[in-house]
Amino acid sequence: MGLVSGFISKGVRNVVSTLWRVESISSALFAIAFYRQPDRDTAPAAALKRTQRWLRSITYSELAKWYEERAEEMAEKDPICATELRDEAMMIKDDPR
């Protein structure tokens, strides 16, 4: 039994999973954006689609800003994580793409 099947067999109504191998950073960005959506009454399929659109369309400068915003949120709770997020934002800003 796989992970998804295990959740479903225990009564979980919705599971978000991939059918193929995905880069860790993409998975993390997707999961964070998906679960940060303010409208918890949105159908999971609609939230999934909104998150997919966001991840496909985000620019480098928007991504750097997103990292900085998450760093600010994490600063008190986890300063090490906040520093790593700021470092990532700086690397993105320095990327000549």
Image: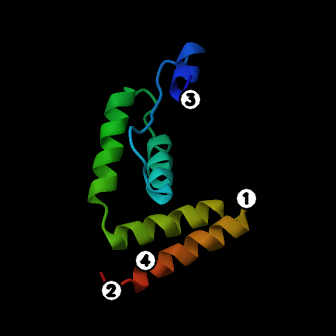
Sequence-wise, which precedes: disc 2 or disc 1?
1
**Which residue is at a point 39% across and 29% down the rendered structure image?**
44
**Which residue is at a point 66% across and 65% down the rendered structure image?**
81
Q: How far apart are labels 2 and 4 at the CA level?
A: 9 Å
**Quadrant hosting residue 43:** top left
Residue type for callout 3: Leu
Q: Position of residue 40 (x, y in %)?
A: 46, 31
Q: What secondary structure is found at the residue carrying circle 4? A: helix
Q: Position of residue 80 (x, y in %)?
A: 71, 69
Q: Position of residue 21 (x, y in %)?
A: 43, 48
Q: How far apart are labels 1 and 3 at the CA level?
A: 30 Å
Q: What secondary structure is found at the residue carrying circle 3? A: helix
Q: How many marks?
A: 4
Q: Which mark is residue 96?
A: 2
Q: Residue furthest front?
A: 1
Task: Give the crowd class for mark 4: few <14, some 14-19, many >=20 residues within 10 Å.
Answer: some
Task: Give the crowd class for mark 3: few <14, some 14-19, many >=20 residues within 10 Å.
Answer: few
Residue type for callout 4: Ile
Q: Which residue is mark 1?
A: 77
The mark closer to the camera, 4 or 3, is 3
Task: Give the crowd class for mark 1: few <14, some 14-19, many >=20 residues within 10 Å.
Answer: few
Q: Which residue is mark 4?
A: 92
Q: Which residue is mark 3?
A: 3
Quadrant (top left/top right/bottom left/bottom right) for the N terminus? top right
The mark closer to the camera, 3 or 2, is 3
Sequence-wise, which precedes: disc 3 or disc 2?
3
Q: Front-most of 65 and 4?
A: 4
Q: Position of residue 47 (x, y in %)?
A: 37, 36
Q: How far apart are labels 4 and 3 at the CA level?
A: 33 Å
Q: Front-most of 21 and 32?
A: 21
